[in-house]
Image (tube, helix red, strand yellow):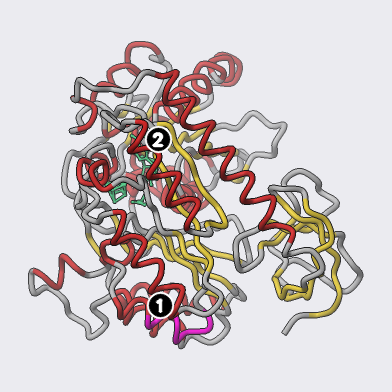
Amino acid sequence: MEENEFVEKVKEKIMGQNLTYQIMTFGCQLNENDSEKIAGMLEMVGYTKASEEQIPDILVFNTCCVRENAEERLFGKIGEVKKWKQEKNVVIAIGGCMMQEPQMVDKIKKSYPYVDIIFGTHTTQNLPENIYKTILKNEKVRDILDIDGEIYEDLPIKRKSDAVANVTIMYGCNNFCTYCIVPYVRGRERSRKPEKILEEITDLANKGYKEVTLLGQNVNSYMRTERENGLTTSAIDSFAKLLYEICKIQGIERVKFISPHPKDFTDDVIQAIADLEKVSSMIHLPLQSGNSKVLKEMNRKYTKEQYLALVDKMVQKIPNLSLSTDIIVGFPGETEEEFEDTLDVVRKVNFEQIFMFIYSPREGTVAAKREDQIPETIKHQRFDQLKKLYESKVEANNEKYIGTIHTLFIEGKSKNDDAMFTSRTDTNKVVVFEPKEGFQIGDMVEVEIRENHKWYFKGEIKNKGE
Ligand code: SAH
Ligand code: SF4
Ligand code: F3S
């Protein structure tokens, strides 16, 4: 990237002007990770991060289109920053998943003509060139490709945290769950080479990072397409094998991953998690629906019974397993009885965390074309019903944490209170605690959990952790 001619030209143009950038990220951790690369490129050409109060010189939106509310939030924000454009001629760039939808690009062009750069998920790496065209050539840039996608290695990266890092191991998705837009906007499944992943994580360990989260839309199908097409070049040709290799890297203490797919949760993956102490025993296992007919219509490729059997097997094999999940309510055609099956699974499985979503029709997907869409009022009723059940389970479950001691590392300052440190338990519960002399961000500590605040705990530092 450094030798890129556009990097040099932009660098020269903005040198000495103290120009700043801001990135607004919507969507999942994959987008967060892309934004870290966008930040890396912006810093490479010479921008520095704007402070909270500052109007930046370049603003990049990294968008999500997985549900309608993500899109609405974006439009609200683009409207808000129009005044920045007028006041300061801020360069406005919009990229990410939503820009892979032609109707959205049209809408931006029509309703927000002051946007300078539009780029998609396959052209993020062109940002220096696109900035060059905007600020040196005064062009409006539309840089979107409708392709299966390639992998660009070695982009610069400016990470958000100094202790925990996201590492994308694969891009795209081949599953085409019928409600989901992701395969259309992220292209086909492709895995990064294991050597590249191991190189990145070794480098992180050398820089003092303790925890990595491996990212992909379907991490446990790592290298599957390559295996099927005879394209693997390494003995590390499955997700389980990759986990064993990553855990050999000294300095990395904890390894997490999202999201695995239940259909690909093969025995070798379960065995790897059981064998490897560094792999977190908190597993995200997206359920989506508890009803076999709905699951079939969603193209999830497992039944209620298979999901429950998988959970049973995992509980038996993985010590201290805890589970989180994603659930969609109000999929087209979902009846009360079918929804009841979802509640039934939630009663049966002890989920530590449930991410609940109201079904949102996505243009171009199979489910969006169905005539039997569920009315909004019913979707909301079901959502509330599920939420109530979930909350009652969380309350009961939280009580068992009080008085327990957890070895955690201090991830940073609490989002809501600058004077407090924040961390998460192995089970992904947020714990906030007062700083103590001799302890800093990145340190391992023993924290006793004292107070239950439903969505977080308050704790107290006891000792240094090992
Ligand atoms: N690849 C991941 C999830 C990607 S999207 C996986 O398969 O688990 C994150 C979550 O958003 C999904 O798990 C699903 O629960 C939810 N989701 C996706 N499309 C949706 C839609 N159209 N309406 C509502 N929720 C949706
Ligand atoms: Fe969407 Fe399904 Fe792919 Fe997840 S696995 S990204 S829900 S299509
Ligand atoms: Fe959203 Fe794209 Fe992630 S649609 S959920 S940001 S892959």
Considering the numbered disc 2 on the image, is that residue within a helix, a strand or a loop? strand
Q: Does residue 195 show up magenta in the picture?
A: no
The three-letter amino acid code for the residue at tag 1 is: Glu
* Residue at 70%, 61% in the rendered image: 423
> In screen coordinates, is 295 left or right of 51?
left
**Nearer to me, 277 or 443:** 277
**Nearer to me, 281 or 91:** 281
The image shows residue 155 at horizontal and vertical percentages of 39, 59
Q: For mark 2, does the 10 Å Cα neighbourhood hold few (<14), some (14 to 19), or many (20 or more) residues?
A: many
The image shows residue 395 at horizontal and vertical percentages of 69, 50
Label 2 beta carbon within 8 A of ligand 1: no
* Residue at the disc numbered 1: 199
The boundaries of the magenta stretch are: 271-278
The image shows residue 86 at horizontal and vertical percentages of 56, 14
Dividing the image into 4 quarters, which one contains the N terminus? Answer: bottom left
Q: Does residue 275 show up magenta in the picture?
A: yes
Q: For mark 1, does the 10 Å Cα neighbourhood hold few (<14), some (14 to 19), or many (20 or more) residues?
A: few
Please name which of the two marks, 1 or 2, marks the residue nearer to the observer. Answer: 2
**Nearer to me, 465 or 191:** 465
- State how far apart marks 1 and 2 are (Cα): 41 Å
Residue 429 occupies quadrant: bottom right
* Residue at the disc numbered 2: 329
**Nearer to me, 449 or 378:** 378
> In screen coordinates, is 205 left or right of 382?
right
* Residue at 45%, 44% in the rendered image: 343
Picture mark count = 2
